[in-house]
Amino acid sequence: MEIKKVVKAYSVEHNYDLDRFISDYTWLLNAIMRKIWSNIRWKEKKVKGKKRILPVIPNSKEFKRNLRNSALKDWKYASHYVDSAINTAYSILKSWRKRYKKGQAGRKMPVIKREFVYVKTTLFSYRNGVVKITIVPRKCYVEFDLKQYWFWDRVKNLNLGGIILKKNRVTFTFWTMKELHIKKPVGWDANLMSFDGYDGKYHYKIPLKYVYTIHREYELKRKRIQEKTQKTKPKTYKRLMAKYEHREQNRVDDFLHKISTSLFMSSRSHIFEDLTDMKRNCKSKSRKKNRQLFKGDFRKLQRFVVYKVNYIGYCTTYAPAKNTSKTCSRCGFVVETRIGAVFKCPNCGLVMDRQMNASINIFRKGLGMWGLGVAPNGDETDDMLPMNPEGAEVDVSQSVGVSINDHLR
């Protein structure tokens, strides 16, 4: 059991005229970033035995105090927004530094293009469901009555966290502390056309072909728009591309939410493979293969399941993805050659579906990370992990909805 902070977020439209305020905040944020960037020192350090030039971000109290004082000179809104901008700038630069160390970012300062304001808890009051945000102290405020929104019953007993203001939308974040338990875990292998699971006894297959079809459909639409309007009608081109990009994302998210809701309603723990650097590590020289790979929304589906399952009190974890498809689930032998749709072990002779084999390995890695000697449901581990995995029963879920819950016992 572990105790974890669980966060939920809801976004709604608003009618306040905050364009000037949000533009000023974004300008301030970029100005602070430029100031910090100009004071970064570059030092040569050894990283994994190799010499690299790495950035050292100024972080002294004196530097931050001078930065705050200079930002406050011409700032006409609440002073706490300067603190918010400084914290946001440092968060962005620290994230950039991590990516730079991994070789995922260049030596170029990040620039904020999407306009927003992060409202700290010191900048608003929250009483009886009404949020009052300070823009200019004693002069300008904006209010939101959360009781009028559809999500009020879900959040009325939660704590209100930070708020993100945009020109026509506002996002509220709510949090609570949850005790997370391990119950009937299932390991999931992510593939382009399916999500394949194993729980020690049964195999599951959730089709994802519909997600791929949506991406392919809009890819062809964008290609036609590009051919007809990109050079002759640039404004129409931008408007149509934005329209169909938004529509594509909505359709994909809707489908993934239905799948994740069905999985979290099964009331059990989930083990996923860690795909953090998947697109970078799996990128090939073939443009066609890269486009196919990027049509799978594996990580988004994982994130949807994680926050929903955590909210109802069940653990989730990410197991290392390395060699999950190449390792024999019977004897542990690692096959170095390319694996096709069927896994064949030259050591013990195991022959089974590659995705089923991978889901077994992910399931076992997850149990090892949780340090389980026996299964969470009380069964012996040896009973849950048969030495003859190809003899395990198979359940195939062909649609989202109640049918998945029926299969996830």
Image: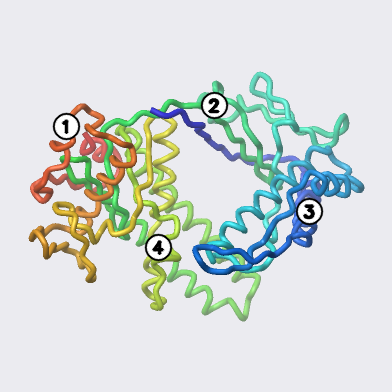
Q: Earlier in the sequence, mark 3 or mark 2?
A: 3
Corner quadrant of residue 56:
bottom right
Choose mark 1 or mark 3, whichever is in front: 1
Residue placed most toward the observer, 47 or 125: 47
Label 4: few (<14), some (14–19) or many (≥20) C-alpha neighbours in 10 Å: some
Label 1: few (<14), some (14–19) or many (≥20) C-alpha neighbours in 10 Å: few
State the SS at label 1.
Answer: loop
Q: Position of residue 82 (x, y in %)?
A: 80, 43
Q: Position of residue 187 (x, y in %)?
A: 28, 45
Residue 70 vs residue 325: left or right? right
> Please, what is the three-letter code of the amino acid marked with disc 4?
Lys
Q: What residue do we see at 71% from left, 38% from top? A: 119
> Please, what is the three-letter code of the amino acid marked with disc 1?
Glu
Label 3: few (<14), some (14–19) or many (≥20) C-alpha neighbours in 10 Å: many
Whether tag 3 and tag 4 are in contact, CB under 8 A, the answer is no
Q: CA distance from mark 1 to mark 3?
A: 57 Å
Q: What residue did someone put label 2 on?
A: 155
Q: CA distance from mark 4 to mark 1?
A: 40 Å
Q: Is residue 118 above or below residue 315?
A: below
Residue 158 vs residue 131: left or right? left
Q: What residue did someone put label 4 on?
A: 295
Corner quadrant of residue 306:
top left
Q: What residue do we see at 41% from left, 61% from top? A: 278
Q: What residue do we see at 55% from left, 26% from top? A: 152
> Please, what is the three-letter code of the amino acid marked with disc 2?
Val
Whether tag 2 and tag 4 are in contact, CB under 8 A, the answer is no
Q: Earlier in the sequence, mark 2 or mark 4?
A: 2
Residue placed most toward the observer, 227 or 351: 351
Q: What residue did someone put label 3 on?
A: 32
